[in-house]
Amino acid sequence: MDRGVKDRVLTPVVIAAHELKTPLILLRQLSLGLQDESLDLATRQQLAYQAQLVSERALRLTSDITKAERLEDALFEMEPVSVAGICREVVDELAPLYRACGRSIETKPRRQSLLAVANRDLLRRVVLNFADNALQYSSPDSPVELSYRLCGDSTLRLGVRDYGPALDVKTLDDIENRLSRAEVVKARPHSSGLGLSIVKKFAEAMSSEVGLIRHRDGATFYVDLPLSRQMKLI
């Protein structure tokens, strides 16, 4: 490939098309499978269910793209949000998709329920994007973990940990530099990084920061949120 073409900056439209290509190809394969008259009813129902899950994932991406493009024109209400509740919602929503892919996702238990100052919808979208990204790189033997903890006196860190391929130092530096500049992040080979770029915009709209931690067996993508001093929600 010509170096000039290889290094060319991709437009948002091209990046979105790249990101949607994978679920569309999978949907086509599933639809072709449903046309196989030799399949029994149970297999057909399973294929139809998988098609539903894939389409829901594609719809989340298109919805996030639209939301990200309109951030500058909108005001987002900030309020105390239960991060444990957000984690449970994301796990409940994505667990069927994870099972269909032979993976699992869970929330790491914690005794203390903490509140963050955030926009509930944007925070939920951030965590969903992290978990969608982790699905592609997680190991069948270890679940993707959602967890949160105090990070200093006034910051709450909510992270999504996958046990997949390790990020080399060069890739790690590249991701961190691009995240700091709100550019599209190509975290790993099979992703355009569009979801993580959207996450950066959502976090900025909440006056929060996103980042990652490199592990020998995977990575943790996280968002740092202002800690709410309000009493625990009932």
Image: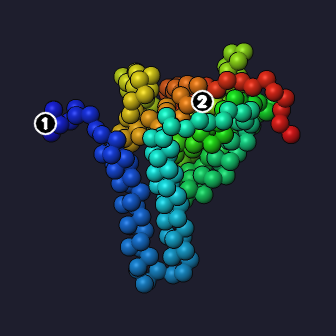
Residue 230 in percent (x, y) is at 81, 27
Residue 18 spot, x, y in % from top left? 33, 48
For marks 2 and 1, the one nearer the N-term is 1
Name the front one of labels 2 and 1: 2
- State left or right for residue 178 relative to residue 145: left
Q: Residues within 10 Å of mark 1 (few under 14, many from 20)?
A: few
Q: Name the residue furthest bottom.
A: 37
Residue drawn at 71 percent across, 29 percent down? 116
Q: Which residue is mark 2?
A: 206
On the question of residue 73 being in view, the answer is: yes
Q: Residue at x 52, y 26 (%)?
A: 211
Do we see residue 175 in this rendering? Answer: no
Disc 1: which residue? 2
Please name whichever residue, 47 or 84, is drawn nearer the observer in this view of the structure. 84
Q: Specify how the rendered protein is coloured.
A: rainbow
Q: Position of residue 35 (x, y in %)?
A: 41, 79
Three-letter amino acid code at the position of disc 2: Met
Q: Residue furthest top?
A: 153
> Which quadrant of the figure contains the N terminus?
top left
x 38%, y 34%: residue:
184
183 left or right of 85 in image: left
* Three-letter amino acid code at the position of disc 1: Asp
Residue at image position (51%, 81%) is 40
- Kindly report the distance in space between the C-alpha atoms of the residues bearing marks 2 and 1: 41 Å
Q: Residues within 10 Å of mark 2 (few under 14, many from 20)?
A: some
Give the number of the disc on residue 58.
none
